[in-house]
Image (cartoon, rainbow, N blue to C red):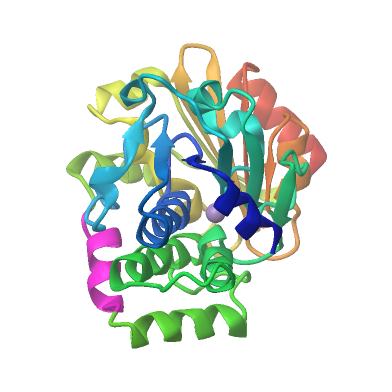
Amino acid sequence: MRIKEKIEQSSSIIIAGHVNPDGDTVGAGLSLLLGLENKYPEKKIDFVLQDSVPKNISFLKGTEKIKKVEDIINPNYDLAIFVDSATIERVGKVEGLMGNAFKINIDHHISNPKYGDINIVKDISSTSEMMYSILKELEIEITLEMGEAIYLGLVNDTGNFAHSNVTDKTFLVASELMKLGVNNNKIVNDFFKTKSFQRMKVLGKALSEMVFVEEKKLMYFNLSYEGLKSLNAMKDDTEGVVEELVNYSDSEVSLFLREDEIGKIKGSMRSKHNVDVNRIAGLFGGGGHIKAAGFTTELSPEEIIKRVVENL
Ligand SMILES: [Mn+2]
């Protein structure tokens, strides 16, 4: 396997996940970090994220080893391994640490343009599910800590094994992880049932202010910067809103717009059945999966909603 050779030839490795990290990017990156550290104690290996690990993920053992960009004083890496990042830009400021490092791109987004020198891009539930197989191929023993990280990645990207991206293989991986001792109930409780007060309030605001566009079966909610601040909430507190919007019986697609800073909008979309939201997100320079995608734009919320409606 070429990536095994590359890893063995490298003495200094950076693992990079995407900005606003989720359970999959953390699960995949952390399991790889712990596995490489165990197998190659002589190598310098850093898992670096631009943003902090969200509270409901930081219960995973090993997350305290994850570094921030400002922790890296003299970056000098031979090898960069991207996890769960559909474009190079998705890793944010971490890209600036990579210099001329050889790039391995491990991802499951169909929109991924294969920007690496080696690309392992598959249409599969999660990068964490891919990582399980990659670790096996690297002949790295999967410990309980690694298994918990991978399991959380599966839970994150499959909506706790509910989405259409779940295959028999996904369950096989979950089963193998439970055999290692992973406690599924504990992980689900720690991950889902630990929402902050602000997060509950954001959800409440979304449910009371959402708008349904009957002819397109689109449910949308637009959260302004002031709206977020008025609830004392942060970006993390909006997790799960877009999934909730598509729960309405008559909706086929949901759109959640969040103003991250004045004039900069982050859009997220979900599809219940056949609508391809990867295509719609692509209209704004974003992408992801057929049933889950996102984008960032400087267009106004009104313009975004108009274009989404026109193109559905
Ligand atoms: Mn993912």
Q: Compared with residue 312, is residue 229 higher up or lower down, i.e. above or below?
A: above
Position of the C terminus, as image quadrant, is: top right
The residue nearer to you, when weighing 227 against 239, is 239
Seen in the image, is 83 located left or right of residue 54?
right
| In the image: residue 21, left or right of residue 71 | right
Q: Quadrant of ligand 1?
A: bottom right
Say whether residue 189 is magenta. Answer: yes
Task: Say which residue appears at 53% left-offset and 74% top-offset.
Answer: 136
What residue sits 38% from the left and 40% below the top? 238
Which quadrant is home to the N terminus? bottom right
- From this viewpoint, is residue 25 visible? yes
The region drawn magenta spans 182-194
Where does residue 289 sit, x and y in percent of width and height?
68, 53
Is residue 42 rendered to the left or right of residue 300? left
x and y percent of residue 262 in the render? 47, 11
* Predominant secondary structure, magenta span: helix
Camera-side residue of 307 and 43? 43
Residue 185 painted magenta: yes
Residue sitting nearer the eye, 133 or 52: 133
| Above or below for 175 versus 229 | below
Q: Residue at x 74, y 53 (%)?
A: 110
Above or below, comparing residue 178 to residue 197 in the picture: below
Q: Position of residue 251 (x, y in %)?
A: 61, 57
**Does residue 97 sit above or below 19 in this rendering?**
above
- What residue is drawn where x is 72% and y is 29%? 284
Q: Quadrant of residue 264?
A: top right
Closer to us: 278 or 20: 20
Res 255 seen here:
no
